[in-house]
């Protein structure tokens, strides 16, 4: 038996009990009217979460599969792309682009900082032959939220498509695919959607579809043309992770009942609660423009950040995320998206306070009174 442990990481996130129960159903076959009806329903309901009238495609895989799909489906070898890099997930776009031999132009700022929308405009003017701009809505490694709405206005004036990683921010921070003019929106299942890891999603504008037609990069499993063809019969080209699709139906039902505006508002309230509590503990927030999805907090001087996270997880039943990439050991991150409540945050705050006090006594015994 594992001990009760509160999971406050920005993916995977806790799964509501009725969603867990939906996954305990016996397996059935997917080329059946029952599955087609289920898949039709979730595909339609996803549109309301993506805030789009476009089709939302579902892949079996984690979020990164949808990132890769949104490179290979729209580009040809040597194409020029601009990548907005402000943390580990922005860097991932660059890694994928380079692996596919694209000409990736990074627009880079240090971890924790923000890329200004007019910088995107400036770089697009320098590179008028850009085919796509790859960005991140919430950079989960730093807790920064990017002004995707303002950026989309600039990209929309060019021939380039704007591809946005909303893997952590979907159903957490306000995001309007159609109204803002995002061309490709990428997400995953294990964050705001409150289901386990294993599904990836992609929605595509007409402008992006036009680019898809001429895109020559090789692709098989994630070729959108075959997903689009199958979806005409509410089907997928390959065996779907149907247990997760059952879970998705349940989770989307929950979101539909609550309504997106309320989901965003509730997440914002948890974010405010968390930021205020961290400031009261005398801690410094890391993100220059904090997302509501998660809060990144600087580890105080003299404290071992990796130890802080492992002591809370192994001894106190609270799993937070540590720092990633160059922020390893320097920050910790508290998620407040999906199935996370005010009392989870309260519990986290008291565990953080207690553990910091213990670790600082251990690290500086001389100052102890
Ligand atoms: C979690 C996350 C990913 C990675 O998703 P996987 O499901 O681990 O492949 C990518 N981008 C962002 C912003 C994320 O938060």
Image (tube, rainbow, N blue to C red):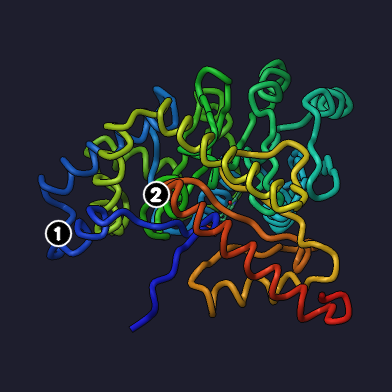
Tell me the residue that label 1 is attached to. 29
Residue 106: % across, % down: 82, 44
Q: Dividing the image into 4 quarters, which one contains the C terminus?
A: bottom right
Q: Which residue is drawn at 76% across and 81% down?
A: 362
Q: What element carries label 2?
A: loop
Residue 354: % across, % down: 63, 67
Tell me the residue that label 2 is attached to. 339
Residue 68: % across, % down: 58, 52
Q: Give the Cα distance between marks 1 and 2.
A: 30 Å
Q: How many other residues sit within 10 Å of disc 2, few (<14), some (14-19) or many (≥20)?
A: many
Residue 129 quadrant: top right
Relative to the observer, which residue lies in front, 235 or 315? 315
Q: Residue at x 45, y 64 (%)?
A: 6
Number of the label disc, if any, that sits on residue 6: none
Question: Does label 1 point to a residue whose CB lies under 8 Å from ligand 1?
Answer: no
Q: Would you place residue 4 above or below residue 282 in this image?
A: below
Q: Would you place residue 258 above or below residue 193 in this image?
A: above
| Count of marks, rendered view | 2
Relative to the observer, which residue lies in front, 193 or 203? 193
Ligand 1 falls in quadrant: bottom right
Q: Would you place residue 335 above or below residue 214 in this image?
A: below
Q: How many other residues sit within 10 Å of disc 1, few (<14), some (14-19) or many (≥20)?
A: few
């Amino acid at each position: 038996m594992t001990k009760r442990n509160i999971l406050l990481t920005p993916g995977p996130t806790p799964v509501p009990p009725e969603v867990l129960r939906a996954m305990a159903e016996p397996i059935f076959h997917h080329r059946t009217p029952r599955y087609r009806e289920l898949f039709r329903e979730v595909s339609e309901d996803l549109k309301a979460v993506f805030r789009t009238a476009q089709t939302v495609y579902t892949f079996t895989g984690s979020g990164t599969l949808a990132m890769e799909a949104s490179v290979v489906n729209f580009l040809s070898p040597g194409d020029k792309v601009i990548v907005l890099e402000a943390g580990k997930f922005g860097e991932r776009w660059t890694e994928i682009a380079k692996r596919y031999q694209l000409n990736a132009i990074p627009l880079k700022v240090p971890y924790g900082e923000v890329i200004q929308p007019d910088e995107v405009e400036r770089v697009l003017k320098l590179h008028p032959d850009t085919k796509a701009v790859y960005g991140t809505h919430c950079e989960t490694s730093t807790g920064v939220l990017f002004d995707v709405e303002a950026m989309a206005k600039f990209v929309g004036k060019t021939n380039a498509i704007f591809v946005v990683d909303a893997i952590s921010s979907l159903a957490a921070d306000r995001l309007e695919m159609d109204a803002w003019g995002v061309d490709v929106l990428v997400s995953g299942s294990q964050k705001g959607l409150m289901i386990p890891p294993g599904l990836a999603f992609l929605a595509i504008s007409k402008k992006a579809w036009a680019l898809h037609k001429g895109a020559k990069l090789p692709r098989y499993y994630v070729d959108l043309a075959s997903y689009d063809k199958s979806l005409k019969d509410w089907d997928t080209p390959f065996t779907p992770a149907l247990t997760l699709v059952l879970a998705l139906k349940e989770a989307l039902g929950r979101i539909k009942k609550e309504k997106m505006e309320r989901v965003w508002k509730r997440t914002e309230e948890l974010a405010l609660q968390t930021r205020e509590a961290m400031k009261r503990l005398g801690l410094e927030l890391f993100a220059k423009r904090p997302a509501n999805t998660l809060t990144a907090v600087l580890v105080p001087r003299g404290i071992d950040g990796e130890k802080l996270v492992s002591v809370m997880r192994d001894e106190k039943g609270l799993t937070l995320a540590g720092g990633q990439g160059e922020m390893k050991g320097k920050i910790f991150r508290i998620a407040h998206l999906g199935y996370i409540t005010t009392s989870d945050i309260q519990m986290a705050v008291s565990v953080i306070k207690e553990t910091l006090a213990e670790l600082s006594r251990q690290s500086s015994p001389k100052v102890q009174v």
